[in-house]
Image: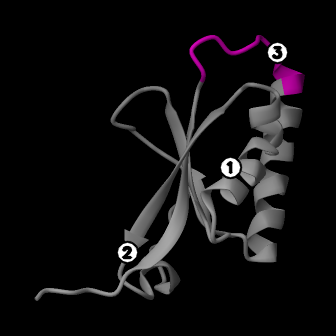
Amino acid sequence: QWRMDLEAFELVMLSRPASPPRYDDDEIERNHQEHLAYHDRLRASGQVVANGPVIEPPYPALRGLTFYRTGSLEEARRLAEADPAVRARRLAVDVMTWYCPPGTMSRPGRPVTV
């Protein structure tokens, strides 16, 4: 019988809502900086393994992905919904479990400037 050990993560897809509120440029910039700082703190705490924007997404609303290591979809959703950009309704979240071979998320990636 075929068997493979897999490591589980909580994947959060960040998307632009259908009807986001309108904000002026200064408010958008402030909120974006809060969003980035929030994810920096989550990475530093070990709750987020990786996150970042999606370039040329398969559907236009998709903005980014975050890979959490919390052990539960509920906790990942709670953290994702506390994101300042989500609270401001600039982003919406979809939460699911994602599996990969052990160690995949700890391999060095290639740096990209966005």
**Disc 1 to disc 2, how far (Cα)?**
20 Å
Residue type marked 2: Cys
**Residue at 63% from the left image edge and 71% from the top image edge:** 71
Q: Give the range drawn in magenta.
A: 17-27
- Secondary element at tag 2: strand
Label 1, on which residue?
A: 77
Is 30 left, or right, of 49 in this rendering?
Answer: right
What mark, if any, has residue 100 been given in the picture? 2
Residue type marked 3: Tyr
**98 or 49: nearer the viewer:** 98
Residue type marked 1: Arg
Label 3, on which residue?
A: 23
Tell me whether circle 3 and circle 2 mark residues in contact (CB < 8 Å). Answer: no
- Tell whether position 19 is magenta: yes
Check the picture and name the quadrant holding the N terminus.
bottom left
**39 or 77: nearer the viewer:** 77
Dot 3 or dot 1, earlier in sequence: 3
The image position of residue 26, as x and y in percent, is 89, 24
**Residue at 82% from the left image edge and 15% from the top image edge:** 23
